[in-house]
Amino acid sequence: MRTKPMLTFSKLDEETGSSLDRMFEKKDCMVEINPGRVILPADYMTIGQDILDMEVKESDVWMCSYPRTGSTWCQEMVWLIGHDLDYEGAKSLQQIRCPLVELSCIMVDGHAEWHDESVKGTSVDLVKYRLPHPRYIRSHLPWDLLPVDIQNDDNTIIYTSRNPKDMVVSYYHYCTLVHGLKGTFEEFCDLFMRDRAPFGPVWNHILGFWNRRHDPNVLFIKFEEMKHDLPMVVRRTAEFLNKQLTDEDVDKLCDHLSFQNMKINRAVNLEAILEKSFGKSYLEQTNLRFIRKGEIGDWKNYMSDDLSRRFDEWAEQHLKGTELSFE
């Protein structure tokens, strides 16, 4: 059992701090959190210790990932399997029925009105006091910042991963659409490779769960697996959650989870929140969407040969000896 540490918060180094402040157009927008040297929005300081100390229930299902790994897609699958294919219930916003425990430090600038009306307090309060049991809880936090009690083998952890080259492309577009990012793609990639990107260091995040993949309460899923054989992943997840699905159930769920249906599903595509925050005309004025392409290898459309090579070298340094690889 992990002992319960006290989080420490520190100002970012000058290079990282000035880059992030310029890119997100906000002074001191991020801080460094320890343990882990994790870069997170400054508002995390108001909820971080509460998350670390919160009680974890045996029936909890924690759906974890680094941002933009196909987690919305995977977590929609997990929620529906866990709720016996309650498609009617799935019409409510994913951000409320299975909230991101740290949501209150993310949906701040530009989204305060939606947050205050929908979350009603902090996202931690929503999880602790108002989420029905069994609780399905999402998080982009690395292992060391999750509740200490999560190490109890009785709760359930499902982690979604993705090739970081595709992940960084998707995360860049997400930050531009939702948080008004102004930096270039190359600058954003540089933050990744210096372990200074939000929610990073990236490899510490991924490997923190990969190294626990053999634990009986941990399921490690790759985005690429879902793309190649979604029915197989659905069945594996159902078995992990001790749920029985017929072939017809699997077919219907895969149809619900198709890219075409996910893209127009307002319970998951963030359009309701973006319209509330920025007005209905916002999405008419941009080609960006929360659910973008859902492709493997989209990085090839954005990375130069040199940038791709540096990304590969960075990945190789961290993956050596881990048995983890990405398509």
Image (cartoon, rainbow, N blue to C red):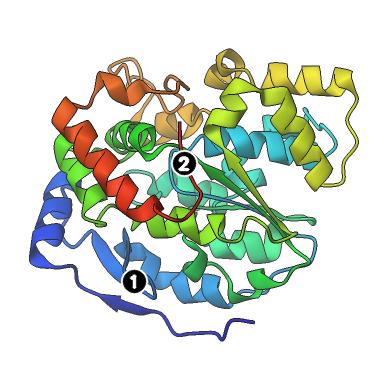
Query: Considering depth in this image, is 236 or 12 the residue closer to the camera?
Result: 236
Task: Look at the image and tell me in which quarter the C terminus lies.
Answer: top left
The residue singled out by tag 2 in the image is 325
SS for callout 1: strand
The residue singled out by tag 1 in the image is 33
Q: Is residue 282 left or right of residue 65?
A: left
At horizontal 59% and vertical 75% (from top left) the residue drawn is 148
Query: Considering depth in this image, is 312 or 147 the residue closer to the camera?
Result: 312
User: From this viewpoint, which residue is outermost toward the front?
Assistant: 321
Q: CA distance from mark 1 to mark 2?
A: 28 Å
Q: Residue 263: percent from the left, percent from the top?
A: 53, 19
Q: Which three-letter amino acid code belongs to the residue tagged 2?
A: Ser
Dot 1 alpha-carbon crowd within 10 angstroms: few under 14, some 14 to 19, many 20 or more? many
What label sits on residue 99 in the rendered view?
A: none
Q: Nearer the viewer, mark 1 or mark 2?
A: 2
Q: Which three-letter amino acid code belongs to the residue tagged 1?
A: Ile
SS for callout 2: loop
At horizontal 37% and vertical 31% (from top left) the residue drawn is 166
Q: Residue 32: percent from the left, percent from the top?
A: 28, 69
Q: Residue 50: percent from the left, percent from the top?
A: 52, 74
At horizontal 73% and vertical 24% (from top left) the residue drawn is 231
42 shown above or below 94: below
